[in-house]
Amino acid sequence: MVRSRVYNFSAGPSALPEAVLAQAAAELMDWRGSGMSVMEISHRSAAFLQVAQQAEADLRELLAVPANYRVLFLQGGASLQFAAVPLNLANADSTVAYVNTGLWSEKAIAEARRYARVSVVADAQASGYRHVPAQAQWQIPSDARYLHYTSNETIGGVEFPFIPSVGDLPLVTDMSSHILSRPLEVSRFGLIYAGAQKNAGPAGITLVLVREDLLGRARAQTPLVMNYQHQAAEGSMLNTPATYSWYLSGLVFQWLKAQGGLAAIAKVNDHKARLLYDYLDAQAFYRNEVARADRSAMNVVFTVPDVRLEPVFVSEAAEAGLMHLKGHKRVGGLRASLYNAMPLAGVQALIVFMRDFATRHG
């Protein structure tokens, strides 16, 4: 059977499970016999409230979210959360601690500096962002209001192999690019936020999991739509939410449950990443310079011997049905994102192509 769809290695917005797309397509014009699309019905209606409630229940089940955490479905992406976190958890004269492991850490730090005093407690910039600094080297101020880190850097292909131990200090993480890729001990965190467009759904929804004792701390000038307490009180519907993205994310959660949950999907993800990294390590044409212990299972970055070959690789890969392999414009190189919806067959096809390309251009 000829495959009509390409293998989409985009870092985001990324591929969605084909079963989810098929269900959404089937329901697009007439959702549940309503004679309307789900994107046309009121977010205040009983029908959509059921969608929202089911999505939250499924997400809580997948991540085993403790009862003392509120789950929010917000807008604005992780970038809005860069500001929302210090606005909700600190004052202008407060010290907040950040770990810098790449471009998304940099962006979070730069935004937080607009609202609080930022202490960068560990910085991997000198290494070209190729490793995660050992926690023993971190210098966390005693008066810090929270510690923030980006648990997976999509651009540099660096993933934290551990959850930092910070005692009673609230731990905050941007988990956009690998949330729902494996089981997670949510209780270790004060706040988790994640743009959905990697593993959790389409662009337009941002997941926020916040421990209840951290609600009600926002400074007075925090916009209401960015205030976690107000959004929690309104069921994430302080304003009109991104209803279709919310609905699609709910379908993704149901798909993940049908795959056996996060423990099962983690085995698939680990297998996909191991196949590609094993190939990279066994040959000399391509290079991955990330410290092995800190390699991302979601975003595999690599280079070719001559930068002039990069556009050739991307073009020929596209002709072979392997899309969006160009690295981020800031760092160049090549990148394959192996999110949940990427099938094993896609990774296998990529390796076959890479072998052929290396033979022809090596």
Image (tube, rainbow, N blue to C red):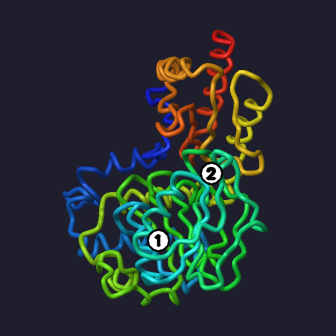
Residue most toward the top?
A: 360
Q: Is residue 115 above or below residue 109?
A: below
Which one is nearer the viewer's eye here, 200 or 220?
Answer: 220
- The image position of residue 123, as x and y in percent, is 64, 58
Give, as a three-letter code, the residue at label 2: Gln
Sequence order check: which comes first, mark 1 or mark 2? 2
For image coordinates 58% across by 73% down, the residue present is: 97
Residue at mark 2: 125
| Crowding at mark 1 (Cα within 10 Å: few <14, some 14-19, many 20+) | many
| Crowding at mark 2 (Cα within 10 Å: few <14, some 14-19, many 20+) | some
Disc 2 is placed on an element classified as helix
- The image position of residue 341, as x and y in percent, is 53, 45
- The image position of residue 102, as x and y in percent, is 57, 52
Q: Is residue 310 above or below residue 221?
A: above
Q: Quadrant of the C terminus?
A: top right
Residue at mark 1: 208
For image coordinates 30% across by 63% down, the residue present is: 243
Q: Is residue 1 visible?
A: no
Q: Is residue 118 above or below residue 197?
A: below
Mark 1 or 2: in front is: 2
Q: Is residue 337 left or right of residue 47?
A: right
Q: Is residue 90 visible?
A: yes
Disc 1 is placed on an element classified as strand
- The image position of residue 87, as x and y in percent, is 41, 78
